Amino acid sequence: GNDREGEGLFTLSVETAASCIHEKEVDVARSSMIFLKTVIDLKGSLSQDTTGSESNVTRARLIIPVMDSAIQRVREDVFMCLITGACGVFPREVLDPAASVLFSLLRILSAEDAEALS
């Protein structure tokens, strides 16, 4: 139903943002990076926040797996794109948001997962 459709649209949005990181148009690349950073930070925040109302905790339990799945699908490509981009491929204007996305991504990964990406 609508839940599955919403999950699919969210995943598609994350995948589209990931594919636009290396876009030549600086505004598109920056916007994609800011969106990905927001998604990753929200996932981390929801995962850590066990306080709050019961309905918020329940909502978080429903949302986190969807966010996890979307991030899992793109994390390797995003990681490699950000690393190669920082090594001279990205224009200067996108280095700050690229570093922010990379930092956020590394914060939510386990040491083993982060090591496996490199």
Image (spheres, rainbow, N blue to C red):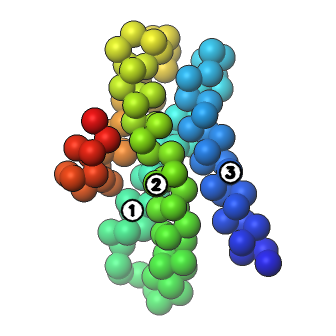
Along the polypeptide, which appears first: circle 2 or circle 3? 3
Give the Cα separation between the discs numbered 2 and 3.
13 Å
Identify the residue position indicated by label 2 in the image.
Answer: 72
Which amino acid type corresponds to the residue marked 3 in the rendered image? Answer: Leu
Badge 1, how many Cα within 10 Å: few under 14, some, many 20+?
some
Q: Nearer the viewer, residue 45 or 73?
A: 73
Label at residue 103: none
Q: Callout 3: helix, strand or loop?
A: helix
Q: Nearer the viewer, residue 5 or 44?
A: 5
Identify the residue position indicated by label 3 in the image.
Answer: 12
- 118 is higher (above) or lower (below) than 11: above
At horizontal 66% and vertical 17% (from top left) the residue drawn is: 25
| Total numbered labels | 3
Q: How far from the left and from the top, in percent, is residue 18?
A: 56, 38
Give the Cα separation between the discs numbered 1 and 3.
22 Å
Identify the residue position indicated by label 1 in the image.
Answer: 45
Badge 2, how many Cα within 10 Å: few under 14, some, many 20+?
few
Along the polypeptide, which appears first: circle 1 or circle 3? 3
Q: Quadrant of the N terminus?
A: bottom right
Q: How far from the left and from the top, in percent, is residue 95?
A: 42, 20
Mark 1 vs mark 2: give the one in front: 2
Mark 1 vs mark 3: give the one in front: 3
Which amino acid type corresponds to the residue marked 2 in the rendered image? Answer: Gln
